[in-house]
């Protein structure tokens, strides 16, 4: 119904913000992670929104990127995950971290979200694993860009990132560590992984 709201921030709390759009204040539910990334009071912001209409309520859920919004919409298709649960999951992990958790079957990471048990997290993985691909992740897009410029080492670098996430690092930390490494076309995955691990400490 409402694709996005764009206006000045009137108020910010941990789970809600008020956006002044042409003199009308829109209450938009947000995650604590989104709240921490918003500009200050009086600054302009654009939030992509999902509209939840019920008999007794009309809620807008807001996200700073279309990517987060699309993942949220996928999450709420899972039985047992409503808008509140979807927002809770995206409050403890980034879009890429969630994708990695689904792809790798890491239910424990998803279950760190408030109100999300291990069984529900497992259901998220089961229902969404065929709808999520590595190509959708930001690190994969960046690696593709680097591959175009550097002669094709992106596959090895991408595998190194995957290996680091399998060791328990977040996808964001893994990507940063790999990007900090002075990678050349001759390096294999093991060499890149060793360099990246040094950058973790």
Image (cartoon, rainbow, N blue to C red):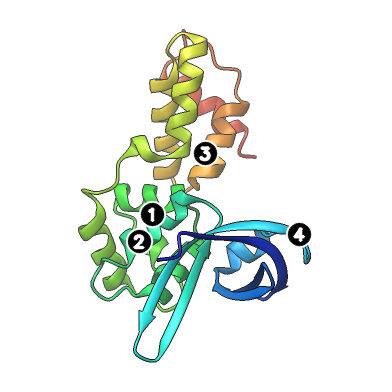
Work out whether 83 lies above or below 126.
below
**Labels 4, 2: front one:** 4
Residue under label 2: 73
Label 4 and label 1: CA atoms lie apart by 25 Å
Give the mark nearest the N terminus, 3 or 2. 2
Residue 15 visible? The answer is: no
Residue under label 4: 43
Given the current orientation, which residue lies at the most extreme front position? 22
Give the mark nearest the N terminus, 4 or 1. 4
Residue under label 1: 70
Label 1 and label 2: CA atoms lie apart by 5 Å
Q: Is residue 184 left or right of residue 6?
A: left
Q: Is residue 145 left or right of residue 122?
A: right
Residue occupying image coordinates x 50% and y 54% = 94
Residue occupying image coordinates x 52% and y 39% = 174
Label 3 and label 2: CA atoms lie apart by 26 Å
Secondary element under disc 3, as helix, strand or loop, is helix
Mark 1–mark 2 contact, CB under 8 Å? Answer: yes
Give the mark nearest the N terminus, 4 or 3. 4
**Labels 3, 2: front one:** 2
Give the mark nearest the N terminus, 1 or 3. 1
Looking at the figure, which quarter contains the C terminus? top right
The image quadrant of residue 157 is top left
Work out whether 117 lies above or below 75.
below
Q: Nearer the viewer, residue 190 or 46?
A: 46
């Amino acid at each position: 119904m409402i694709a996005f709201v764009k206006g000045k921030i009137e108020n910010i709390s941990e789970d809600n913000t008020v956006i002044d759009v042409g003199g009308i204040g829109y209450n938009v539910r947000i995650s604590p992670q989104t709240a921490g990334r918003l500009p200050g009071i009086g600054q302009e912001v654009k939030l992509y929104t999902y509209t939840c209409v019920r008999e007794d309520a009309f809620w807008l859920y807001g996200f700073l990127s279309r990517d987060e919004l699309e993942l949220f919409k996928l999450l709420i298709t899972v039985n047992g995950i409503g808008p509140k649960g979807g927002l809770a999951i995206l409050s403890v992990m980034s879009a890429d971290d969630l994708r990695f958790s689904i792809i790798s079957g890491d239910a424990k990471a998803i279950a760190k979200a408030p109100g999300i048990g291990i069984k529900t997290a497992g259901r998220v993985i089961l229902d969404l694993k065929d709808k999520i691909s590595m190509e959708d992740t930001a690190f994969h897009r960046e690696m593709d860009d680097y591959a175009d410029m550097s002669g094709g080492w992106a596959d090895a670098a991408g595998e190194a990132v995957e290996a680091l996430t399998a060791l328990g690092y977040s996808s964001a930390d893994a990507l940063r560590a790999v990007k900090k490494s002075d990678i050349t076309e001759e390096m294999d995955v093991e060499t890149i992984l060793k360099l990246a691990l040094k950058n973790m400490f």
